[in-house]
Amino acid sequence: MNKFFSVLAVFAMLNLGYVNGAFAQDEDVENTEQMAAEQTAPTEPVAPAPVEAAQDEESDVVAASSEAPAAERSFHQVVKDKFIAGGPGFMSFVLICLILGLAVCIERILYLTMSTTNTKKLISDVESALKSGGVEAAKDVCRNTKGPVASIFYQGLDRSTEGIDMVEKSVVAYGSVQMGLLEKGLSWISLFIALAPMLGFFGTVIGMIDAFDAIAEANNISPGIVAGGIGVALITTVSGLLVAMILQVFYNYIVAKVDGIVNDMEDASITLIDLMIKHQNASK
């Protein structure tokens, strides 16, 4: 009996050791698997955040760079775009009116500037020449002086031998000729001033017709169709009015300058007649 209990005790101890070893092996296996899982587990995505931020910054830079050229458009580019939008067919005629009108205006301004004479100095020189050298000396003074006033003086002095009446008639007749030369080209400027808005309105009417044709073709009155056609049509009207305003300013300046020169011519002519009368009375 004692021997039997001894065998049972030994068997129990062996089983307990085996169970403890199995538990230890299980714990080792679990620890090994846990370590492997920790090693193979994916880490937290820390890097993508700066990448996304960099991409956002890059997109902002690209957007800013794309908006910069639109904000920095020059006046020349804006005018070019409007010219193309208005239609080169009608806008070309308006541009031709502007170019030709400005050319005539510049030519007239240069001519009138060269025609301006210091009438007070001329009258003083003619009077001194009449007293010192007579009519021929006065004619030399007028011959060496530029401008319509000097030309009128020369024509009057050239008829001095035929009497005061003939001097007065020649001054009036040649004054009319000089006035015609001063006013030369003003009719062309007036034509361009009237023609530019008419061409603009004509282009607008044609553009409106095209807009209504587009509406009829689409069978739909959408804001895009109507606004686009009307906007393009009105560009020609704006261009024509702008050209007319620019040329009108130059036209008024030229007319004012012509009036000033004509007034000087009339005053100087009256003074010349008085000088001739004094010279004839003094020579008697």
Image (cartoon, helix red, strand yellow):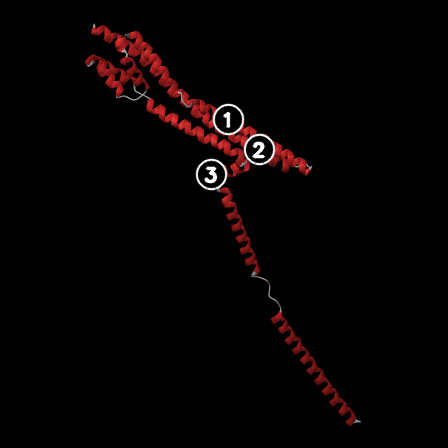
Q: Check disc 1 and give the amino acid type.
A: Leu
Question: Is the C terminus in the top left, top right, bottom left or bottom right quadrant?
Answer: top left
Q: Check disc 2 and give the amino acid type.
A: Ala
Between the C-alphas of marks 1 and 3, the distance is 25 Å
Disc nearer the start of the sequence (2/3) = 3
Displayed quadrant of residue 150: top left
- The kind of secondary structure element at disc 2 is helix
Residue 145, placed above or below residue 10:
above
Q: Residue at x 50, y 28 (%)?
A: 196
The answer to whether residue 152 is left or right of residue 93 is left
On the image, the x and y values in percent for residue 135 come to 23, 13
Which residue position holds label 2? 233
Report the disc number at residue 195.
1
Residue 175, placed above or below residue 45:
above
- The kind of secondary structure element at disc 1 is helix
Between the C-alphas of marks 1 and 2, the distance is 17 Å
Q: Residue at x 33, y 22 (%)?
A: 115
Find the residue positioned furthest to the right: 1
On the image, the x and y values in percent for residue 38 come to 62, 70
The answer to whether residue 136 is left or right of residue 84 is left
The mark lying in front, picked from 1 and 2, is 1
Out of 127 and 12, give the one closest to the viewer.
Answer: 127
Question: Is the N terminus in the top left, top right, bottom left or bottom right quadrant?
Answer: bottom right
Asked if the residue under mark 3 is in contact with the one under mark 2, i.e. CB atoms within 8 Å, the reply is no
Which residue position holds label 3? 76
Disc nearer the start of the sequence (1/3) = 3
Between the C-alphas of marks 2 and 3, the distance is 21 Å
Displayed quadrant of residue 44: bottom right
Q: Check disc 3 and give the amino acid type.
A: His
